[in-house]
Each structure stands twice: as structure tokens, then as C-alpha cells.
Amino acid sequence: MSSPYPWPQGRRAALCVTFDFDGESPQLWRQRDEPPQDVAELEQRRYGPRRGVQHVLDTLDAAGIRATFFVPGWIAHTYRSAVQDVHDAGHELALHGWRHEPPAALTAAELRDSLTRASDLLGEIAGRRPAGYRSPSFRMAPAAFEVLADLGVVYDSSLMGDDRPYRIGDLVEVPVDWATDDAVYYRYTGAESRPPAGADALHAAWSAELEGARAAGTLVNLTMHPWLSGRPARIRRLADLIHTARACGDVWIGTVGELAAHHLALGTGVPVTEVPLDTIGWPQ
Ligand SMILES: [Zn+2]
């Protein structure tokens, strides 16, 4: 049996609550060459910065936990007061591109420019540069690691190669999982072949992931979107999950930045995965 990962405070497992606060920016990127005439999806997505994020902040405040918000620079520019509210409520702001561009879709210069602009703006809002990054749609590219390190970023949270924090090159990777991403359950814009799942279905899946993590000593890293999970019936179930995790007594709950800092401070002799950056790409 492998040795357990040393979670903060000697806990058995860990829970991070994260939001990709991207509003309409993914659609703006996806349809940049052929802007649609209708505004249906734009308005559906604008629910996030307009209303959803406030429901999210109220819920996190009532639960007494701090979360990590990955925010495209364009969103911080366009909805600055909402992003300021997130920071002022004590949550962590982290990078998510400028207009939700996956790194592989950009040249090296474009990638550096978009992330530098976003880091400058989030740094202005938070009073310090962001320490973390999540690639849009989890589409990470090897070239991004070096740019991020140059910007003082210490962690990425986009990949699924472990179920505990691990190391890719100079960055800590705090892994994600499609199984705990709300978009898989809730994303419905009128064209999908199935209806959106109900809040109980996602809560049941999260609960199973939490049980599994406590049994195996692993991480549950929730990925949510204010335009999806900010709806009242849905965000209530997050409060239920946090209540359950707290009641367990053996689950550490904190931000991704805190977990990355904890990982960086671990001494030698700890069983962690290290992936050299030159092995992350397609085998030559
Ligand atoms: Zn996103």
C-alpha cells in the first residue's frame, strides 16, 4: 500500500472549491470569427458575472470558506466591480487566460502577452500578482509552463495526471477531474442532445468523490462556473457538500493557492509525483 499524502493539518483528504469565472468569454473566443446575431447564449453566460457570482459569494460567506476563482483578464476588465467583490470577500484570484484562449491556440508571443496583461490586471485588483493558473477548458500546453513561471506563477490547476498535488517542471500541479466539473452536468444552451442534470445528481456524484477521497487519501477539486452553479437551487447543494465535508472531521478545506504552497513546503522523502517538463508533451 502506498504511503498517504501528507495533507495540511494532518487531515486524511482535501477539498478545494474553485470557480472558473469566465461568463461569456469562452463564447467570445469560440465564435470570434463569426459573431452570432442572437444573444441567447451571451445572456445565459452573463448571468454569471451579473447574478450568479453574488449567490456564490453569499453561499461561501455563509459556509465560512474561501475559494479560488480563475478569472479571464477580459472578465476582470469588463466586470471589474464583481471581480473586486470576489477579492474583497477574501477569495483567491488566479489566471484563466485573457479571453479564454487555450494556450495551444496562441503563438508564444501571444500567450506571453495575454497572460501578462491578465496578471497585471488581476494584480492591480488583488494588490499582488496571481500565484495560479487554470487553462481554459483544461487545455494545457507545455509552452505555457515557462511563461507562467516567468510571471511568478507557482501552480497550475488544469491537468488530471494524479489525484494529489504533483510537480510538472517548476510548477505545482493541483489536479482537476471532469467528474467534479459542473459543466459536464449543467451546461445546456439549447442545442445539446440531453437536458441538464439536476442539482441532486451532481451532489450525489460529489458525495461519492468525497467518500472515495477519504478512503484513498486524495484530493477533491471542484470546478464550478458562476453562470451554471450560481443558480439558487444549485449553489445550495454546494453548501450541503461543505457541511458534510466539515462534519467528517478529517477533510482539509482550503484554496488551491494554499494547497500549492503546502506542497512546495514539503520536505524530501515525501511520496509525490515529479514530471519533468520535457516529458509532458507527445513522445518523440
Ligand atoms: Zn473557463
Image (cartoon, grey):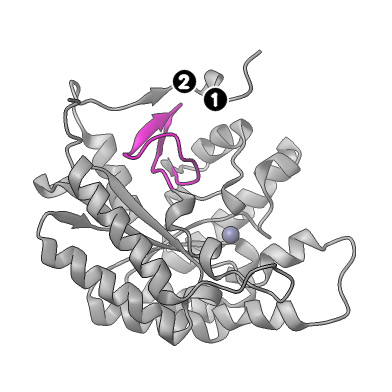
Q: Nearer the viewer, residue 216 or 154?
A: 216
The location of residue 87, given as percent across then percent down, is 40, 71
| Three-letter code, disc 2 | Pro
Q: Quadrant of ligand 1?
A: bottom right
Task: Give left or right: position of 112 versus 64.
Answer: right
The location of residue 173, given as percent across then percent down, is 41, 38
Q: Is residue 171 above or below residue 45?
A: above
Looking at the image, how many numbered discs can be counted on the residues?
2
Instruction: Categorize mark 2 by other alpha carbons within 10 Å: few (<14), some (14-19), many (20+).
Output: few
Q: Quadrant of residue 50?
A: bottom right
What residue is drawn where x is 64% and y is 69%?
Answer: 194
Q: Are marks 1 and 2 in contact (CB under 8 Å)?
A: yes
Q: Quadrant of residue 234?
A: bottom left
> Which residues fall within the magenta stretch?
156-176
The residue where tag 1 is placed is 280
Instruction: Categorize mark 1 by other alpha carbons within 10 Å: few (<14), some (14-19), many (20+).
Output: few
Q: Quadrant of the C terminus?
A: top right
The residue where tag 2 is placed is 276
Task: Give left or right: position of 276 versus 9.
Answer: right
The residue furthest front is 194
Residue 16 in view of the camera:
yes
